[in-house]
Amino acid sequence: MNNPQQLITGKVRNDWTIEQVKSIFTMPFNDLLFHAQTIHRQNFNPNEVQTSTLLSIKTGACPEDCAYCPQSGHYNTGLSKEQLMAIDEVLDNARKAKQTGATRFCMGAAWRSPRTKDFDVVLEMIKGVKSLGLETCVTLGMLNDDQADKLKQAGLDYYNHNLDTSQDYYDQIITTRTYKDRLVTLQNVRDAGINVCSGGIIGMGEEVQDRYGLLMELANLPEQPQSVPINMLVAVAGTPLENVEKLDHIEFIRTIATARIIMPKSYVRLSAGREDMSEETQALCFFAGANSIFHGEKLLTTANPDENADQQLFDKLGIKPEVREVSDAPQDPSVADVVNAANADSVGGVKFTNAAV
Ligand code: SF4
C-alpha cells in the first residue's frame, strides 16, 4: 500500500518502508503541506513554537571526522579549541537564555564520548541548569548504559544524538563511528528513561533517496524520538563539504512536512541553516509542522538569526513561544549552592575549574 492518501492516518507507526516515505515526500506540494498541517493541528497548538538555546560547553578538536563539522580535529577550519567551560559560566548563559524566552537549555561538547572527570562536571551543570527551571538537553557523543543512567539521575530531560543521514550514505559522511554505534547510544538513552532528540542534516550531497532513508530510520526507531531536529547544511570552509551544492529550500520544506506526517507526535525542530532561509521559507516550515527552533546568535559554532529577528518573525506570523512547566527540577543542590561550589572550585570531590580536556 503506497497510496499516500491511505498512508496518512495520523497514527504512530514504526514499520515505514522507503517506498511509503517516498510516496508522501513526493506528493504535490500543496497536498503535502495540507496533510502535514492537518496532522500538526491534531497533535499540537499550530501557533506555538518551542524554543531552545544551544551552548557549546567544549569546542573543537573532536576526534571524530563528521564531514560537515567545523569542530572535527581532522579539518582545518580555523576554529580555536576551547576547554570545558566552567559551571558558573554555563549557568550565566542559562539564566540569559531563560530571560530571552528559552524553555530548554542544550549543552554540546565536541567529544567522541565523555571522559569520567569531564562527565562528572557535566552532571553538575545539568543539576544547576535544571534548578533554574529550564529543561535540560546535552549532546556529548556516544554513551554507555551507565553514563545514560547517571545523566537521568542528574535530571537530564533530553539527549541529542543525530542519525545524520541514511544508512546508505552514512560512510560518505563519517568513518570514525558506525550507524550501529549511534543506534546503541540511542537505545541506552531510551532505556535510561531520557527523552531522545535525534534527527539529521539535509543538503550534504546526498540523493533524495537518502532523505527518505533518514526519515524512515527515525520513524522506525523502537520509540519515535520526542524531538527531531532537521538541519540544513551550513557549508563551512575547510570541511570536506564546503563546496557542496546548495539545497533547494522546497526540498527542505518537503523534508519537514514528511517528518511531521510520519512522526506525528514528535517535536520537529527547524535547526541549523535558518540563517540562510528567508522569512517566507521559515514560515512555510512552520506551516509544514516545524514547532521547535533554536534561538540565540550561535548554534555551537555557526551563526543563527538573533533573538530580535526571531521575535519579529513570530510577531508577523502570530506565533507564541510555547510555555512549559518544569515540575521536577531538583531542589538540592540549589543554583546558589552549585554556583558557590563552582566558585569554591569543588563540591563533593568534583573539580570545577575548566576541567582539562
Ligand atoms: S559532529 Fe560532533 S562528533 Fe562529529 S566532529 Fe562535530 S563535534 Fe565531533
Image (spheres, helix red, strand yellow):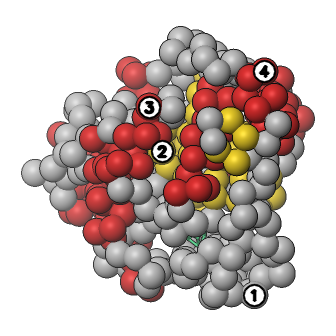
Disc 4 + disc 3, Cβ < 8 Å:
no
Residue 80 visible in image: yes
Q: Is residue 44 above or below residue 73?
A: above
**Residue at the image point whose x is 56% and y is 18% from the top:** 330
Reading the chain from its start, which is encountered first: label 4 or label 3? 3
Residue highlighted by disc 3 = 153
Instruction: Tell us which disc is closer to us: 4 or 2.
Output: 4
Q: In terms of image quadrants, where is residue 287?
A: top right
Disc 4 from disc 2: Cα separation: 25 Å
Instruction: Tell us which disc is closer to us: 3 or 1.
Output: 3
Left or right: 78 as drawn, with respect to 327: right
Q: Secondary structure at mark 4?
A: helix
Q: Position of residue 7 (x, y in %)?
A: 20, 42
The quadrant of the rendering that contains the C terminus is bottom right
Q: In terms of image quadrants, where is residue 334?
A: top right
Residue 314 visible in image: no
Would you call the spot at circle 2 few (<14 residues within 10 Å), some (14-19), or many (20 or more)?
A: many
Disc 3 + disc 1, Cβ < 8 Å:
no
Left or right: 160 as drawn, with respect to 125: left
Reading the chain from its start, which is encountered first: label 2 or label 3? 3
Q: Position of residue 244 (x, y in %)?
A: 63, 83
Disc 1 + disc 2, Cβ < 8 Å:
no
Residue highlighted by disc 1 = 76
Q: Given the current orientation, which residue lies at the most extreme right position?
A: 308
Q: Is residue 279 above or below residue 331?
A: below
Q: Which mark is residue 164?
A: none
Disc 1 from disc 2: Cα separation: 28 Å
Q: Secondary structure at mark 2?
A: strand
Give amino acid for label 1: Asn
Q: Quadrant of ligand 1?
A: bottom right
Reading the chain from its start, which is encountered first: label 4 or label 2? 2
Residue highlighted by disc 2 = 159
